[in-house]
Image: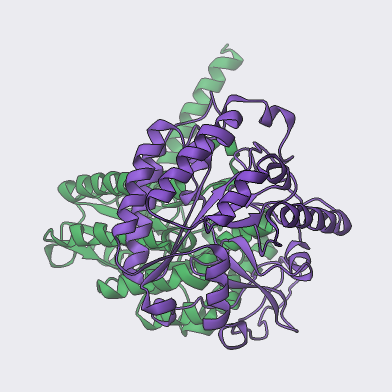
Chain colours: A green, B purple
Amino acid sequence: MTSTLEQEIDGLAAAALAYASRFERIDKVSWPNGARIAVNFTADFDAMLLRRLANESPLQLAKGEFGGRVGIWRLIELFDGHGIKATIFTPGRICELYPRAVIAAAKSGHEIADHMWEHHVPKDPDLERDHLLKAAAAIEALTGKRPVGTRSWHTQALLKSEGFIYNSHGSEQHGPGYAYDAAGGNVLVNLPFHYAIDDAMFFSMSWMRSDTLEQRISDPDRVLDMWWAGFRQQYDAGGYFNVCLHPFVSGRALRIAMLDQLIVRMKELPGVWFASCEDVARHCLAQHPPRGGHF
Amino acid sequence: MPWKHGYTISDEVGIKDAAIRWPDGKRMAAHIVVNLSLASGPAGITRADIESGPAAFAINEGLDLLLAALARQSFPVTVAVPAVMARALAPRLRAMRAAGHEIAALGVKHEDTSGFSRADEANVIRLATEVLADVVGERPVGWFTLPRQLDRYGVGTLSPSTIELLLDAGYTYFGNGLADDAPHYWVTDPTTRRAMLALPYYYHFDDQHFCMFPAKGTGLENSDMLIRNLRAELAAQWRRGRYFTMVLHPQHAGWCNRLGPIDAFLADMAKLSGLWMATGRDIARHWLKAHPPETNLALEPSIWKDYPGSLS
């Protein structure tokens, strides 16, 4: 008879393998025109919503407000100046707070994708659906296009039923692939990002409700070096690089300058495909469909 | 804007670089704030804060060294002072004022008033204003609520009443706004358009967040990062023709390993063309004239809708 501890070993080991098996990698991904790497610049346009959700102080909200009044415009200008199509993950409520910026981003050809109605996913399934529909409708009302992508904790079955094709939310693998739900269905394109390539980890105090004693703020020179190393590794390997930005963080003048340097260096190399997440997702579906069968 | 109470304090789109006008055709404005508080946490200055090595250094050698570094470049600065420190350093403050620096308010003890009643907070503002007026010989026009190292958030603290009370008390500007990196208007009532000018602040340009942060002994010394942040922001904002600000404390910026790089940074600032080095008072005076709220604050009705199951 096996002991409780032995059963626990078996249970956890099986769970680890089962969870990892939900993510399917694309081996030897090929990009359009023989590109070596696809780069997704993504911006989570929370502004002050997450701060408001956490009931933070007035000046914390003002810190986020910078993203809506100033930062988003600078990111649009930066990407437009480089001819880059970015993906702006936009909470539905932001459409009510910053309609002009959302419209301007869409007009420039950037993808406006879902980032939840108010930056959280309700546990109640009916309310969850209500939130997703509200967010999608808010984006569609401003841009004329219903989002097909999300960066969220939304239930995969719900996303699938509402026509979403990808989620850019995890770090299960470097490159794009496919994510299945626990029952092995509802497959979505998985466009991973990582907190190490996320501006808020280096530049936003009290991010994710951290305490003062846990703060770790950095400087643009140091972060540029780290991100360049990440990009270069994926470039050499032939892969994918997803940069997660926040307008209230990266919209600060010193970081726009840092991103400009990063983009200029990337463009010096041949075979870098700057694309929106939707473009990458559709390319993967067309060229590297999921092995698990019907999408 | 669209305006949304509890979410936004100013209008929907910040002023564009090209629209900003600085005096005499200057390219950009730079505002240095010297923070004379010794408070380590939200309670404001305590006996333990005062009876410490860094405190003794701050009000003697540290202050001498920092003021000398600023004087080498003839930079006027805004000195943010809690009433406690104004009493302790009265002759020095008068000398700073005479040297062309501005003396601005930083509470009575640099306390966090976010949990105070409106009456108690009004009393803090009244008392701090009176003490500064008595020491310096003129009422302060700028009010700061800068963060302390052990604050929950590194942005400064406000109650829901603070800005209204400052307007009531006749203040011209609020010193640590975060919704823009140029001066902007903090609207307290969108109907009447009552608003206060806010001058920018950002924690990456405040020495305390890189100097043995958040507390001596256990904190991290990242003053090299501070300097790289300051240099990167100054260069970027100079290209935009916008605004630069930083906050320096004698106990942090005055210590040897930080003072040298700060000194070099100030010398490089002085070499920049078209830089308008000014006090908060002068910047506020200029901004209110060049970019008054009547023509620059674009407030529109909110399109926000309340729904069941959503935040209001």
User: Number of labelled discs?
Assistant: 0
- Residue B91 in view here: yes
At horizontal 64% and vertical 70% (from top left) the residue drawn is B8
Point out residue B227 in the picture as x, y percentages from the top left corner. 37, 45
At horizontal 78% and vertical 56% (from top left) the residue drawn is B130
Point out residue B285 in the picture as x, y percentages from the top left corner. 57, 74
- Residue A47 in view here: no
**Left or right of A208: which side holds A25?**
left
Q: Nearer the viewer, residue A142 or A262?
A: A262
**Left or right of B250: which side holds B90?**
right
Quadrant (top left/top right/bottom left/bottom right) for the N terminus of chain B: bottom right
Q: Quadrant of residue B29?
A: bottom left
Q: Please identify the residue farthest to the bottom as the structure is shown.
A: B295
Point out residue A181 in the picture as x, y percentages from the top left corner. 49, 51
Q: Nearer the viewer, residue B257 or A61?
A: B257
At horizontal 57% and vertical 88% (from top left) the residue drawn is B295
Q: Is residue A7 above or below residue A57?
A: above
Point out residue A44 in the picture as x, y percentages from the top left corner. 47, 62
Quadrant (top left/top right/bottom left/bottom right) for the C terminus of chain B: bottom right
**Left or right of B144: which side holds B123?**
right
Q: Nearer the viewer, residue B185 or B261?
A: B261
Q: Please identify the residue farthest to the right as the structure is shown.
A: B119
Q: Is residue B22 above or below residue A231?
A: below
Q: Nearer the viewer, residue A7 or A139?
A: A139
